[in-house]
Image (cartoon, grey):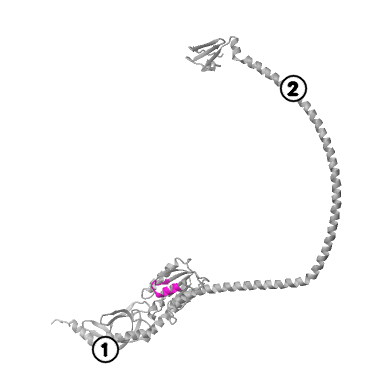
């Protein structure tokens, strides 16, 4: 007879029995929460996983349940003890009983949780991240970036709706000294699973305008330790540590120190403290300048006082000597003045005699010169008269010759001698080549005109 096998229910029932016999008491297990869901009755449903430490691949998975009456006690106990939200992504040490139902299969019923394990795991992960950053040589890189003496242009990473953003801007804009700051908001998500990616994206945008800004300020208001989990991210810390501008972190309260705080160039407690730090930089620079100015004024006053004392000393020391020298020079000046007056009188008298003598000689010289010039002028006038007379006679004779030539060449005279003049179009014909058959010509005689039409032109042939 053929084997009919067993039913699925029977198989599951046998598995249930095996599990119950093998795990007859509760167990403490370590797992990572990969998913958390709640229903309207207050029950919590979890998915637990274990990952390979070297590859980060999931090597085990199980469903778990915390019934409502247990979850109402475990959740606040865990969050108060650890400062972490009971959420996906954390490792837990939990006390479970193993259950198997024929319909729903294998599940774990969570009865208790040990917060100290989660705290230890968080501390271990932070230590691992810090060690990795140090081994890669980037842990202190941003701290080594020179902080500007006057951080005037600020790249700000924050949520635009956060109270911390408003606190920062109000503190910056209403500073008592009236310093002017220029800031640009690069909005980002500041908590939750998307915060790491969002803040890194904001840093990338700022990096495109690196030459515009002096510093980067990352701010958010305080919150629970769980709210700050994203700031313990390796990749976020890695990007901040290597950023070319100095980074100021103001993301929590005094009791909270994240990995981002550790790698940043400057760490302050709150957004308000970040604004105060920037204002203090201006105050320190102003105080330094005022100190230099005061030192300069004091130095000048000391120099002037010393010079005044030296001058007073020299004045007292040399006053009698100067007085004696001045009296001696005054007497010498009076004597020189008398000599000068006497010499001036003698010189004036001598120059007066010389001037009179020169005046007499000049008068005689001028009279002689005028006489010579007058004689020369009369002689030239006589010579010019003779030459002009001759020139006029020559010109008169030439004019007479020109007049005879004009009369001789007058066409009327030529006509009187029996010659004629031929005209074409009112112009005298001088060459037969200018005439053609049928041309109209006028022949002028001494006593009249004859109009003709040329019948034939016979030019003279050259031999």
Q: Kindly identify the residue that appears in the image at 41 percent across and 82 percent down.
A: 124
Counting from the top left corner in percent of width and height, residue 389 is at 74, 22
Q: Is residue 373 left or right of residue 165?
A: right
Which circle marks residue 22 in the picture? 1
Which circle marks residue 390 in the picture? 2
Q: Nearer the viewer, mark 2 or mark 1?
A: 2
Q: Residues within 10 Å of mark 2 (few under 14, many from 20)?
A: few
Confirm whether residue 280 shows in the render: yes
Closer-to-camera residue (67/386): 386
Closer-to-camera residue (104/232): 232
Closer-to-camera residue (184/430): 184
Magenta stretch containing residue 158, yes or no?
Answer: yes
Counting from the top left corner in percent of width and height, residue 248 is at 46, 74
Q: Quadrant of the N terminus?
A: bottom left
Q: Residues within 10 Å of mark 1 (few under 14, many from 20)?
A: few
Q: Earlier in the sequence, mark 2 or mark 1?
A: 1
Q: Kindly identify the residue that appears in the image at 47 percent across and 72 percent down.
A: 174
Q: Is residue 103 left or right of residue 125?
A: left
> Over which residues does the magenta segment extend?
157-170
Confirm whether residue 135 shows in the render: no
Q: Quadrant of the C terminus?
A: top right
Q: Kindly identify the residue that appears in the image at 86 percent across and 43 percent down.
A: 357
Counting from the top left corner in percent of width and height, residue 318 is at 78, 70
At numbered mark 2, what does the secondary structure look like: helix, strand or loop? helix
Counting from the top left corner in percent of width and height, residue 70 is at 29, 86
Corner quadrant of residue 292 = bottom right
At numbered mark 1, what does the secondary structure look like: helix, strand or loop? helix
Q: Are marks 2 and 1 in contact (CB under 8 Å)?
A: no
Q: Is residue 23 left or right of residue 81?
A: left
């Amino acid at each position: 007879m053929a084997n009919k096998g067993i039913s699925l229910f029977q198989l599951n029932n046998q598995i249930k029995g095996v599990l119950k016999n093998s795990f007859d008491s509760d167990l403490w297990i370590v797992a990572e929460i990969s998913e958390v869901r709640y229903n309207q009755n207050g029950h919590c449903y979890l998915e637990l996983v274990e990952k390979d430490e070297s590859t980060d691949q999931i090597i085990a998975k199980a469903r778990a349940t915390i019934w409502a009456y247990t979850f109402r006690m475990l959740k606040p106990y865990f969050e108060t003890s650890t400062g972490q939200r009971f959420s996906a992504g954390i490792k837990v040490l939990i006390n479970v009983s193993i259950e198997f139902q024929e319909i729903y299969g294998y599940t774990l019923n969570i009865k208790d949780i040990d917060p100290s394990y989660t705290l230890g795991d968080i501390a271990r992960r932070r230590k691992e991240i810090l060690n990795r950053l140090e081994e890669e040589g980037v842990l202190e890189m941003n701290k080594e970036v020179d902080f500007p003496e006057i951080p005037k242009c600020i790249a700000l990473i924050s949520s635009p709706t956060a109270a911390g953003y408003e606190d920062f801007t109000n503190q910056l804009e209403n500073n008592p000294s009236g310093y002017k700051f220029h800031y640009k908001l690069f909005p980002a998500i500041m908590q939750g699973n998307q915060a790491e990616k969002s803040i890194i994206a904001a840093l990338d945008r700022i990096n495109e305008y690196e030459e515009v800004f002096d510093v980067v300020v990352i701010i958010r208001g305080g919150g629970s330790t769980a709210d700050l989990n994203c700031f313990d991210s390796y990749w976020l810390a890695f990007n901040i540590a290597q950023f070319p501008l100095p980074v100021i972190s103001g993301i929590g309260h005094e009791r909270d120190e994240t990995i981002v705080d550790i790698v940043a160039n400057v760490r302050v407690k709150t957004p308000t403290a970040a604004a105060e730090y920037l204002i203090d930089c201006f105050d320190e620079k102003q105080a330094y300048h005022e100190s230099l100015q005061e030192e300069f004024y004091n130095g000048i006053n000391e120099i002037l006082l010393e010079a005044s004392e030296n001058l007073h000393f020299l004045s007292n020391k040399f006053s009698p000597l100067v007085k004696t020298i001045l009296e001696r020079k005054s007497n010498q000046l009076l004597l020189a003045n008398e000599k000068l007056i006497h010499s001036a009188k003698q010189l004036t008298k001598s120059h007066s005699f010389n001037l009179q003598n020169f005046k007499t000689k000049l008068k005689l010289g001028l009279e002689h010169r005028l006489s010579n010039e007058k004689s020369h002028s009369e002689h030239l006038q006589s010579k010019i008269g003779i030459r002009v007379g001759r020139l006029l006679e020559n010109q008169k004779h030439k004019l007479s010759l020109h007049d005879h030539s004009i009369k001789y060449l007058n066409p009327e005279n030529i006509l009187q001698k029996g010659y004629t003049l031929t005209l074409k179009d009112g112009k005298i014909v001088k060459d037969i080549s200018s005439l053609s058959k049928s041309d109209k010509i006028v022949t002028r005689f001494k006593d009249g005109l004859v109009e003709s039409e040329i019948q034939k032109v016979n030019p003279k042939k050259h031999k």
